[in-house]
Image (cartoon, rainbow, N blue to C red):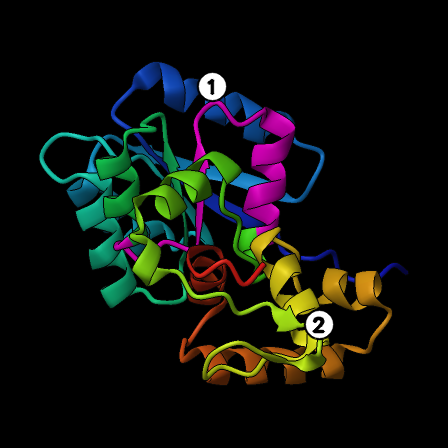
Amino acid sequence: MTGAESPRIKVLVVDDSRLTRMSIKTTLKVAPQAIEWIGEAEEGHQAIEMVKELKPDVVLMDIGMPIMDGVRATQALKRQFPAVKVVMLTSHEEEEHVLDAFSSGANSYCLKETPPEMLVHVILSTAHGACWIDPKIARIVMNQLQPSDRVNLQPSPANPDESIGTILLTEREVDVLKLITEGLNNAEISEKLCISMNTVKTHLKNIFQKLEVEDRTSAALKALRERIV
């Protein structure tokens, strides 16, 4: 007798483009991983009602939609259903759209041009607690910052356990933070750095405390914004 299978990750797709919804649906339907497409919505209000009814694990959310756009919809979803993971999926590379997206509280951010296999990876990683930020989006955010906003928090060569400024990050914490920005979950970080899961959790707790953030996405964003990694 075999053990029970892991529950499938339920995904709701929100986009005003029927063609885009069909493309993503096809990608998810043929994905070999445990992903289940459960429905689609055309705008934010409809998405919120469908989340109430279908209880997805992950919502793929477009930014530019009529009636209620993806930024406002994500903000509303995070207030009502904080456990639901949101992947902000957009074709917009314009700075204003990207910066608006970062204010929404989404867990991950990627472009619609992301290859299907990478999109599946982003969904799986996000569902298991990781965050993923498309490098193009990260560059736009960093380029928008004034030089005075950027703080060099890399460990100094003279003392690898300290960093310039008031925040002290150990070399290992910087390693963990870098892997967070790459979208790795705790198990993957543990394997990559050859440390235990408990050690990973301890590093994450310390990182959140030192950076004064509450979650992985905020930590990753601050790491990119302040060029910690």
The residue shown at (39%, 60%) is 150
- Image-quadrant location for residue 112: top left
Instruction: Please name the residue that numbered disc 1 is placed on.
Output: 23
Q: Residues within 10 Å of mark 1 (few under 14, many from 20)?
A: few
Image spot of residue 84 (x, y percent):
40, 59
Q: What x and y, as percent, mark residue 120?
A: 60, 37
Query: Looking at the image, which is closer to me, 194 or 127?
Result: 194
Tell which of 198 and 149 is nearer to you.
149
Write down the residue under mark 2. 157
Report the quarter where the C terminus lies: bottom right
Q: Residue 113 lies in magenta, yes or no? A: yes
Can you say whether 114 is above or below 154 in the image? Answer: above
Q: Which residues are magenta?
A: 103-125
Magenta stretch encompasses residue 173: no
Instruction: State the quadrant of the N terminus.
Output: bottom right
Among numbered discs 1 and 2, the one appearing first in the sequence:
1
Amino acid type assigned to the residue bearing label 2 in the image:
Pro
192 lies left or right of 110? right
